[in-house]
Amino acid sequence: MIERLDRVALAVGDLEGATGFFERLLGIRFDPPLSDETMGLDARYSPEGVELVAGKPGSFMEKLVQDRGEGVFCLVFKVRDMEAAVAHFRQMGLEPQNDVHFGALREVAFHPRDAHGLRIVLAAYPEAHPASVAVLGG
């Protein structure tokens, strides 16, 4: 059911400051920032599996960082069959908190109260060979 750990998402207050810090600390690079106006988020991803997420003013994420501070927000697991994975999670007593689509990416999140304090997100998206991504400019 779970293919792999896709990424660890960190909630941060200053996206650019955190980007510079983790690039220097870990010797990695982040992709250009992505913005989701609907959810009120800005994010940056690294090929190594680190995601930095910052909330726009008034968003859930901004409030979360203000109330609880920066830190691990969730673990994202890649799945091949989202419907089967969600059904399994439901059998285990977890109910989806949200189900979002970003282009070809679909993510379903589960509340941390249902998983021993861990926010779990399932992600499904088509795979591309790294050479194809490089040739296509991704």
Image: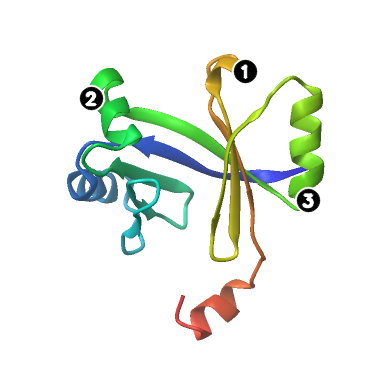
Q: Nearer the viewer, residue 28 or 65?
A: 65
Question: Residue 97 appears at what percent x and percent y?
Answer: 57, 32
Q: Residue at x 80, y 35 (%)?
A: 87
Q: Residue 125: name its quadrant.
A: bottom right
Return the disc, 1 or 3, that comes first in the chain's sequence: 3
Return the disc, 2 or 3, that comes first in the chain's sequence: 2
Q: Residue at x 36, y 62 (%)?
A: 31
Label 1 – label 2 distance at C-alpha: 23 Å
Residue 114 numbered mark, or none: 1
Determine the secondary structure under disc 3.
loop
Determine the secondary structure under disc 2.
helix
Q: Note whether 40 is above or below 35 in the view shown.
A: above
Q: Nearer the viewer, residue 61 or 1?
A: 61
Q: Residue 111: name its quadrant.
A: top right
Determine the secondary structure under disc 1.
helix
Residue 96 numbered mark, or none: none
Q: Say what amino acid the circle numbered 3 marks.
A: Asp
Q: Note whether 66 is above or below 39 in the view shown.
A: above
Q: Pointer 3: what residue?
A: 81
Q: Pointer 2: what residue?
A: 66
Neighbor class of circle 2 (other Cα within 10 Å; few <14, some 14-19, many 20+) is few
* Left-right relation of 25 to 6: left
Label 2 – label 3 distance at C-alpha: 35 Å
Q: Residue at x 52, y 85 (%)?
A: 135
| Circles 1 and 2 in contact, beta carbons < 8 Å | no
Q: Note whether 38 is above or below 63 in the view shown.
A: below
Return the disc, 1 or 2, that comes first in the chain's sequence: 2
Label 1 – label 3 distance at C-alpha: 21 Å
Q: Say what amino acid the circle numbered 1 marks.
A: Asp
Question: Residue 103 appears at what percent x and percent y?
Answer: 54, 65
* Left-right relation of 105 to 72: right
Question: Residue 120 appears at what percent x and percent y?
Answer: 58, 32
